[in-house]
Image: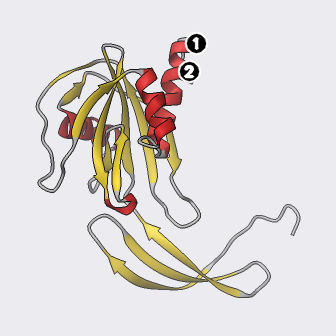
Amino acid sequence: MGNQIWNEPTLSTEEIFKGKVINLQVDTIKLPDGRTATREIVRHPGAAAVIALHEGKLVVVEQYRKPLEKTQIEIPAGKLDPNEAPEVAAARELEEETGYVAKQIKLLHAFYTSPGFADEKLYVYFTDQVEQGTQHLDEDEDVIVKLITLEEAERYIASGDISDAKTLLAVYTWKLLLATGKLQ
């Protein structure tokens, strides 16, 4: 196929599940050589996360993650509401989950979390200008807010208590900032 641009035209779509957070569909597609195949696709509205530093510590939440059957320590994050700008969602999630209010935030990265089967795009923001506000958890949400040092973050990574991509990115971004004075 050489330099040919790949394309997989959709021949049909079957909606399998429609939920509060995700939808699942199975697409029948046409391969470049003419054969057909199926693709299982998770549709997600997108999400935003915040690397928030307060007094030299990273603002994180510890929460139980049912798919993993264990607690995890993560940076604040959540899905985008319909027609919500990612930076608005990031600031909202930071305050809702932790009670901290960002005076300003800066977009660092936007990336697809699992492009092999999902269209979720995660926007990661940075702030080191936060002040204490009021936490507003969702009714089915239980978190413990923590302020952790870089050394604690590294221990949590080593123990597996930090193991999600967004929080790993946060810790390595923080290390870069401390080493170089730059975020990227």
Q: Quadrant of residue 7?
A: bottom right
**Residue pictured at 34% horizontal, 53% vertical:** 70
Q: Residue 62: x, y in percent? A: 29, 41
**Colour setup of the view:** secondary structure
**Residue matched to label 1:** 180
Q: Separation of disc 1 and disc 2 at Cα?
A: 6 Å
Q: Amino acid at mark 1?
A: Thr
Q: Residue 100: x, y in percent? A: 21, 28
- The answer to whether residue 56 is above or below residue 33 is above
Q: Residue 2: x, y in percent? A: 88, 64
**Residue matched to label 2:** 176
Q: Determine if residue 108 is in view.
A: no
Give the tally of numbered discs. Answer: 2
- The answer to whether residue 134 is above or below residue 84 is above
**Residue pictured at 54% horizontal, 16% vertical:** 182
Tell me whether the residue at label 1 lies in contact with that at label 2, contact meaning CB atoms closer than 8 angstroms.
Answer: yes
**Residue pictured at 37% horizontal, 44% vertical:** 48
**Residue pictured at 15% horizontal, 56% vertical:** 140
Given residues 8 and 57, the one toward you in this image is 57
